[in-house]
Structures are given as C-alpha cells and as structure tokens.
Amino acid sequence: MVSLFFKALNRNRFKTFLIYLSITVAITAIFMITSISRGIIGMYSTMLKSEGDIIITQAKIADTFFSDVSVSLVSSVQTVAGIKEVYALILGASPINELPIAAIYGVSENRFKTYALTQGSYPKKGEVMLGKNIDARLHSPKSVSISNKMFTVSGIFENGVGFEDGGAVLNREDASAIFNKEASILLASIDKSADATSLIEHINALSPDIEAKTTHEFVDNYNQFKIIETSSNVISAVAFLMGLLGIASLISITINERRSEFGILRAIGKSSRFIMSMVVGETFIITCIGFISALLLSKGLLLMIAHIEKFQGYVNGELSVQTIVVVFGFSLFMALLGALLPAYSASKIDPIILIQRGAL
C-alpha cells in the first residue's frame, strides 16, 4: 500500500514538488518567527534568573532600562532573614568603538562570579570585560571607547547568553558615571527553605519607591516580553494561515484533477474507503517530508543566525517541543482537509461520469 502512495506522488512530480515546497516554506516561516521571539525572551530571562530569585526595580516603571534604584537598599535587603546575597546591576546601551550600539552591564563586584572568564581577569575601575561575541566583532581590542570614555579590556567571558556574550561588563561605579543612575535593578538570591512571598513583603516595606517580585513572576508579566510574544504570535499566525490555506488549495486542485483516476479505480472494484485511504496516505507522506525538511532548515538557519558576527549573539532562537508538535498537528490537519473534501466528493460520483468528465 505504501508503494502505491509513492507511485501516485511520483506521477504528479511537479504538483508534488509545489505542495512540498509550500509546506516547507510555511512551516519554516512560523518556526523562525516563534523561535526567534522566544529566544530573545529566554536569553533575557536566563540573564535575570542567574543567581537571582527576587528582582527589585523602581516602582511603577515600564522598563528595567528606565529603572533607577538606590544602592543604599543593598545593605537593607541583605539584612532580611532568608536573603543570601544581593547584586546591583545597571542595564544600558551605548556605542562601543565602531559599533553603533551594544549592551552595557554595570555590576557590583559580587556579581562577577556569574561571568565565566575565558581569558584575563575581572574588571577593576577604568576597565571593561567583553563578551566573546563582541570581542570577536571588535577583533580582540586592547581598549574600547564607551560613551566617549576609554576603558582597558581586562578579560573575555562566555556565558552562553547572547545578550551578555554580545555586551560589555563594567564596574557598577563606572557604569553609574555613564548612565547617571546608581542601579537599574537589584537581584537577590534566597535560601532554599525561605518563603519568597514573605521576603518580597519585607523588601517592599523597606521603601515605597521600589517593587520586588520573583524573577519568574517578573518575566511572566514583563510588558516588553508580552509585546514581543503577542506580535510574533500574530505575525506567525497570519503567515502560517496563509501558507496552510495555499497548501490546502493546491492539494485540493491536485485531487480534483485526479477524478478520472478515481473513476477507473472505482470501475475496477476499488471501494471509496480505498480511495480515501490512498489520499490520506499520500497527504500524510508529503506533509511529513515537508515538515521534516522545514524542521531541519529552521535548525540550520537558527544555528547560522546565532553565529553571524554582525548580530553579536543578540538574535538567537529556541525551538520548543510544544511548538513542533502544535505546528505539525495544524499542518497535517489543513493538508488532510484540502485532500479529503474533494476526494470524498469524487468517491461518491458514478465512476462512469468520473471517467468521462475527468476533472470537470
């Protein structure tokens, strides 16, 4: 039976190729859009969750880049029972040498341990540590200019997080002089036995100007992430729907053109069930082949994008199992819908009429 499926597909090579190409392109488009948006969200959330269970920002602020938190709160938060360590971070962006924009992180000294050095040492005052991606982009400089201030490169690090590997890390004091703020956020690590909700209440009571949340809660409710996710979902849904409708239409036309073939099969004694199973088998095979091709192509493109020097690691992708399963299910459903409706209609018509009138 399987050999019949491949023979039928081989008889209509051009249309089979068009269907295969349509399936591959449509599925690749949704994979790329959703995986890149989730990759951006994943990288930023991983950066925040590194040694941080609770995040403290300025109250009622729309974005962490605009947040300004007093570092005097570090000692107060550190005294709360259940808090292990508190880190101060400044998040910013600035031109570096010939690069028009790059991420800048000003961190307290106790935060340096979260950066895995590959060479050199952690930065002292007047020094900077570069991520491996931006170091390669700048061709391993000995010094860099950040906001018209020169800094000596003390070392190179690799964290596996595109945002950090494509950025520069300074002492918090140096970054404070550049961005005119004490800290964008404070990150606090807590004891495993501590109750995060109780600790957050204690921290929020320290000042009306701050807002503390668990990093998980912050990531889930971060406005910028919601905008990115919603936009990518809308764009990918429209692209995917248009692609699937094209696939269903193309398959439907192909099946309609095979009415005379179905009439001959009926005339020699084949049942409507046989015709339907044949159509299902052919559609399933071409959809699976197109899906696998799209999956491999997407993986290759995402890997290539992650290593394009100009992107500095900021563009990355995460292709989840859930996305793969959902996309495959919808693709198969639409392809079968486009194939079964005309096939079912043809299987109910008198075989003599089908043979005489062909696709009419």
Image (spheres, helix red, strand yellow):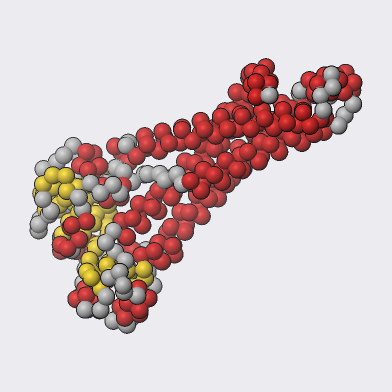
Asked where in the image residue 214 lies, by quadrant, the reply is: bottom left
Answer yes or no: is residue 282 visible.
Answer: yes
Residue drawn at point x = 47 percent, y = 59 percent: 226
The percent position of residue 281, horizontal first and vertical second, equals 67, 30
Q: In this rendering, is residue 162 above or below 356?
A: below
| Position of residue 171 in the picture relative to residue 8 (left or right) | left
Asked where in the image residue 270 lies, by quadrant, the reply is: top right
Answer yes or no: is residue 101 visible.
Answer: no
Residue that lies at the very extreme toward the bottom in this rendered image: 205
Asked where in the image residue 66 lies, by quadrant, the reply is: bottom left
- Image quadrant where one finds the C terminus: top right
194 or 60: which is nearer to us? 194
The percent position of residue 125, horizontal first and vertical second, equals 9, 58
Residue drawn at point x = 37 percent, y = 44 percent: 316
Q: In this rendering, is residue 14 above or below 86?
A: above
Count of marks overlaid on the render: 0
The percent position of residue 324, horizontal first and vertical second, equals 51, 43
276 or 230: which is nearer to us? 276
Residue drawn at point x = 87 percent, y = 29 percent: 349
Residue drawn at point x = 65 percent, y = 20 percent: 3
The percent position of residue 105, horizontal first and vertical second, equals 23, 57
359 or 50: which is nearer to us? 50
- Image quadrant where one finds the N terminus: top right
